Amino acid sequence: MHKVIQTIREDGYSSTKARQFSESVIREMSRIAAAHNAINLAQGFPDFPAPDAIKQAAVQAVLGDHNQYAVTWGTKGLREAIAGKVQRDYGVSIDPERQLTVCCGATEGMIATLLATINPGDEVIIFEPFYENYGADVILCGAVPKYVSLQPPEFNFNRDELAAAFSEKTKAIIINTPNNPTGKVFNREELELIADLCIKYDVLAINDEIYEHILYDNTKHIPIWTLPGMADRTIAVNSVSKTFSVTGWRIGYVQASPEITASVRKVHDFLTVGAAAPLQVAAEAAFKFGADYYQELSGFYSERRDYLLTALEKVGFNCVKPLGAYYIMADITPFGWDDDVAFAKYMASEIGVAVVPGSSFFRPDSTAGKTLVRFCFCKKFETLQAAVERLQKLIVKR
């Protein structure tokens, strides 16, 4: 019998890329919340039912035997429904046969987009704070992230800092508006400046706009791809998750020029083959909802934003009022803390409310998020009220 000698590689079996980022802190906080029976105001998923119409459409799709592979880049009906929505909302005609790719959520849409367009060594500009996937996605592509700060309280960027981030090495810039985690909505002047730099340096704009219809105080979402010169150099990543309260469905899509779409479709095919067929059929029904649905959605979340924002400020947090999405960034220094991770764990275990530590939205070597946490308010009023009741313990402990 040969003796088997077990050895471990000196560098382990993790790739160099995988060692450059951690697991999702947001998803980790959901597990911590469950372990402590804490109210989960960390991960951004609703705890209320999705619209009846979209649920019934899903049931009918399954019963109607739409249960096998769909066309790799999405059912024809869904792509046509998305194109119809784009025409209604923005007055722009897109070709559903050549400009849309249905993916397994915006998460796959983003990584498929980057893998399809970015080469190792390219530079990708990311506004900071940022949704945590962006940094990991860029690293997985072998590219180099270049960060530009969004400065509170309005989370505006410095024009000179942004201009300095662009160079001949820049391949793309990632824009998330309305923004997670800050709630910032980029205005036309800011987007025009970004567009001018993209055109000057021949750079792609990758626009994550999954919160496009969750807006407050008469704020308007302006897709950068509607600006002059940007239609063919913008890739829009979107999803049904947030707008229709079905985060578990994982139905997203990428909108781009025919040339870019051809590359995205190839990568998407080998990443996942395709998104869930019956849920694509159901999502088609959702994209036919009228303007009143989106107005009600903003009003629904606006009430929750105002309620939680007021409650947090009364407890003692310093907060930034979001203009879009459904998150509130809060400063923890009034409570004497300067370690966001420790504070988030304390909140879950001792206060009974889970939040996301702010540092997860910043580059690993940054200290800018150490005094911040993120709350989400995409919850039933009863959930928010229960969370606010638990937060009263912070007043005693200050």
Image (cartoon, helix red, strand yellow):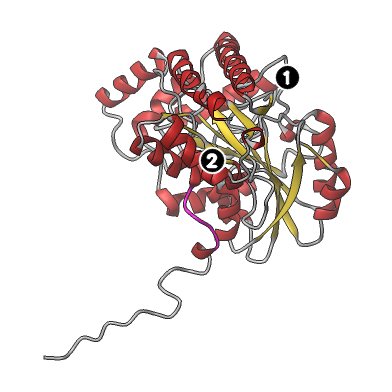
In this rendering, position of residue 273 left or right of residue 325: left
Q: Secondary structure under badge 1?
A: loop
Q: Which amino acid lies under the numbered mark 2 shown in the image of this protein?
A: Phe
Which residue was labeled with disc 2?
343
Pointer 1 local density, CA inside 10 Å: few below 14, some 14–19, many at least 20: some
Residue ID at (30%, 21%): 59
Q: Residue furthest right?
A: 160
Q: Nearer the viewer, mark 1 or mark 2?
A: 2
Secondary structure mainly formed by the magenta segment: loop
Rendering quarter of residue 159: top right
Q: Nearer the viewer, residue 306 or 294?
A: 306
Quadrant into which the C terminus falls: top right
Label of residue 380 in the image: none
User: Picture coordinates of residue 356 (x, y %)?
Assistant: 53, 38
As displayed, is residue 136 above or below residue 128?
Answer: below
Q: Residue at x 61, y 41 (%)?
A: 337
Q: Which residues are magenta?
A: 20-24
> In the displayed structure, does residue 166 sit left or right of residue 100?
right
Q: Looking at the rendering, which quadrant does residue 373 occupy?
A: top right
Give the secondary structure at mark 2.
Answer: helix
Q: Which of these two is toward me, 280 or 356?
A: 356
The disc, 1 or 2, on the residue closer to the chain's N-terminal end is 1
Viewed as shown, does residue 268 lie left or right of 92? left
Judging by the rendered image, the residue that carries numbered circle 1 is 219
